[in-house]
Image (tube, rainbow, N blue to C red):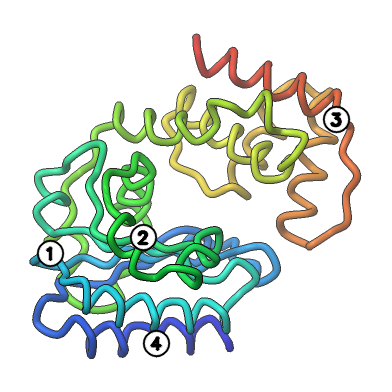
Amino acid sequence: MQADRLIHEFTEQSKRILKDNLTGIYLHGSSVMGCFNPGKSDIDLIIVVDRPLSDSVKRDYMDMVVGYSASGPAKGIEMSVVLRKVCSPFVYPTPFELHFSAGHLDWYQEDPDDYIRKMNGTDKDLAAHFTIINKRGKCLYGAPVEAVFADIPGCDYMDSIRYDVEDAAEKITADTMYLALNLARVLAYKEDGLVLSKKEGGEWAVRNLPAKYCPLIEDALREYCENAEVVYDENLARHYAEYVLERIAR
C-alpha cells in the first residue's frame, strides 16, 4: 500500500476506534524530513489522547495498527499513544500508554493480552519525536501541533538522542548504516544545535568530520537513500564510533 493511502486509512481508523478521546495524530520522522525510503523507513506516528485507554480499546487499536503495519513500508509503522497532559507541560522521561514497532510484532501475535498489560511506561525517545513534531512535523488530524506540544528543553532532546547511540562503539558493526548516521546527527546537535534527519546528519558529517571517515559515511548514505548493497570496513566503523562518541562527551 502506498504510504499516503496507508496514513489516510490509519487516521480514519484511529478516529473510529478512539472516538472523542482522540486529541490528534502527528506524523514525524523521515516522512516529514524529506528522506522517506520505502525500503529502509518506517512510518512514524504519535497519537495523543485525552484519557487512558481501556484494555479492550488497546486490543482493537493494536489489531488495526498491526494490520496496516504489515501492508506498509519495509519497517512498517512505529507509533506511540501518549496522554495530552504529558505533552504540555512536557514530562521527561515521557510516559506512554501504548507503543508498537515491527520489533514487537512477535510478542503481540504470541500473547496480545500480555503485550497490552505490559506495553506502557516511559520512553526517552519521545523527547526526540516531540522535538521533530514541533519543528517539522505534520498534524494529520485534531488539535494543531502548537496547541498540544510544549517546547522540548534542549537538555532533554540531547539526552534522548545521546541515549540512542550510547552503545554505538559496541554495536556499530552490527547496524553500521543506522548508527553511523545517527551518531552524526547527535554530534551535529551537540556542536551546531541542528535538529537533523539521518540523511541530513550524514551530509553534515561529510562536511564537518575528518576526511578519513567520509567513505564510511558516504556508504551509509548510499545504503540509506539508494538501498545500495554495502560492505563496511568494520575497523573504520569502530574507530568512527569511538571518535564521534568522544566528541559528543566533551
Q: How crowded is mark 2: few (under 14 residues within 10 Å), some or many (20 or more)?
A: many
Q: Disc 4 marks which residue?
A: 8
Q: Which of marks 3 and 1 is nearer the N terminus?
A: 1
Q: Earlier in the sequence, mark 4 or mark 1?
A: 4
Three-letter residue code for mark 4: His
In the displayed structure image, the side of residue 28 where residue 134 appears, left or right: left
Q: Which residue is found at the position 79% from the left and 42% from the top?
A: 218
Circle 4 sits in a helix, a strand or a loop, which is it?
helix
Residue 183, percent across and down? 60, 32
Q: Which residue is found at the position 46% from the left and 77% from the top?
A: 66
Q: Disc 2 marks which residue?
A: 99
* Tag nearer the camera, 4 or 2: 2
Circle 2 sits in a helix, a strand or a loop, which is it?
strand
Res 23 quadrant in image? bottom left
* Tag nearer the camera, 4 or 1: 1
Q: Residues within 10 Å of mark 3 (few under 14, many from 20)?
A: some
- Do labels 4 and 3 touch, CB within 8 Å? no
Q: Disc 3 marks which residue?
A: 234
Three-letter residue code for mark 1: Pro
In the displayed structure image, the side of residue 98 where residue 177 appears, left or right: right
Three-letter residue code for mark 2: His
* Tag nearer the camera, 3 or 1: 1
Whole-number angstrom distance, CA of label 2 to CA of label 1: 13 Å
Whole-number angstrom distance, CA of label 4 to CA of label 1: 24 Å
Above or below 20: residue 112: above
Whole-number angstrom distance, CA of label 2 to CA of label 3: 33 Å
Q: Disc 1 marks which residue?
A: 52
In the displayed structure image, the side of residue 114 where residue 178 appears, left or right: right
Three-letter residue code for mark 3: Glu
Q: Earlier in the sequence, mark 4 or mark 2?
A: 4
* Tag nearer the camera, 2 or 3: 2
